[in-house]
Image (cartoon, grey):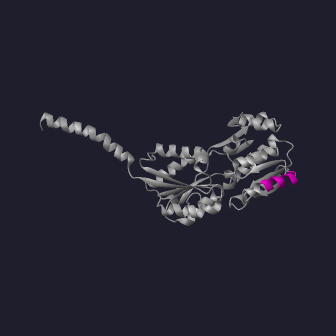
Amino acid sequence: MDRRTFIGRVAGGLLAAPLAARAQQVGKGYRIGILETIPAARNAANLDALRKGLRDLGYVEGRNLVIEYRSADGRAERFPDLASELVRLKVDLIVTRGTPAARAAKNATGTIPVVMATMGDPHAIVASFAHPGGNITGVTTFSTELTGKRIELLKELVPSLSRVALLHNMGNPAAPPEWEETKTAARSLGLQAELLDVRSQDDLGRAFELAVRRHVDALLIGADGLTQMHQQTIVDLVARHRLPAAYPAREFVEAGGLMAYAVSYPDLYFRFASFVDKIFKGRKPGDLPIEQPTKFELVINLKTAKTLGLTVPQSLLLRADAMIQ
């Protein structure tokens, strides 16, 4: 081989190497369907966390990834049709949030992998935590388990508390266990528990009228598509009736709510990416154990507390992960 030929081949190899690496990085194109309770604009923090997790693993929108986002806009009855639409689009995987969305995806397909964040007991969807089986895996949000903790925090913040109410959509399969947990936790603290069942936006105003008639001192807000969709309406109604309330997600406190104790949803969505990557690389979703949350956060709105005439005890201030002034 003469010198000119050798140099030409080396140069060609150097030029081709980055192109080959880039092609390898892009790989196959994937389509992910997302079945959610609220519109994408309202879900931005969680979606940003999911996209970051996917980018870190080499999945980039516009290059080798397409995301099909579908929102039920707080109406759980829309999930079956939306899930069927994603199946018709032949997505490679479906991400869901909430028990109704997970059930709709499960009923719509037995073959497309589903990665869920379920609010209720995962056993209502899968066979077991360790071996989910079928085409579903994901994480649990400990929504039921955290109900009692929220009551404890309310009692600590409002020592005179005697009657607490759970505002929740009892049509959601995850809600009845939360109501049972509410009653149990309330009894253990010497409190009376009331239920405010809301199935539609029109029920919200009537629920607060009932709270007044029953002399409710504080509220627990359940995690449901309806409460998430009408987050600001609920926060405004709580403020109008000057009621302390504990919420199921940080977003409510950022909208003016008093306090939230919950899992970090951006952290869960970031973790979704690892499930997606494992499945796209050949793992069966039914072989991937259901994971439990590892990051929780207590968020307190000090401005709202002041408006309600509440002094946040030092014990809560020291435990808070974030305080909104």
The span picked out in magenta is 205-215
* Image quadrant in which the N terminus is located: top left
In the visual, does 137 lie left or right of 7? right
Residue depicted at 71% across the width and 49% down the height: 146
Q: Nearer the viewer, residue 96 or 71?
A: 71
Residue 48, image quadrant: top right
- Name above or below for residue 13 compared with residue 40: above
User: Residue 142, image x and y in percent?
Assistant: 66, 52
Q: What residue is drawn where x is 43% and y is 56%?
A: 282
Residue shown at the point (50%, 59%) measured from the top left? 113
Residue placed furthest toward the left = 2
Q: Position of residue 220 (x, y in %)?
A: 76, 50
Question: Who is closer to the viewer here, 28 or 191?
Answer: 28
Instruction: Say which quarter of the image contains residue 300.
Output: top right
Quick check: can you spot residue 127?
no
Magenta region includes residue 258: no
Residue 201 seen in the figure: yes
Is residue 84 shown above or below 217? below
Numbered circles on residues, count = 0
Could you tell me residue 171's position as x and y percent?
Answer: 71, 62
Determine whether 286 is above or below 52 in the image.
below
Tell me the chief SS of the magenta region: helix
Answer with left or right where residue 120 lies relative to residue 1: right
Quadrant containing the C terminus in the rendered view: top right
Seen from the viewer's position, the closer of residues 181 and 94 is 94
Q: Is residue 214 magenta?
A: yes
Q: Position of residue 115 (x, y in %)?
A: 54, 55
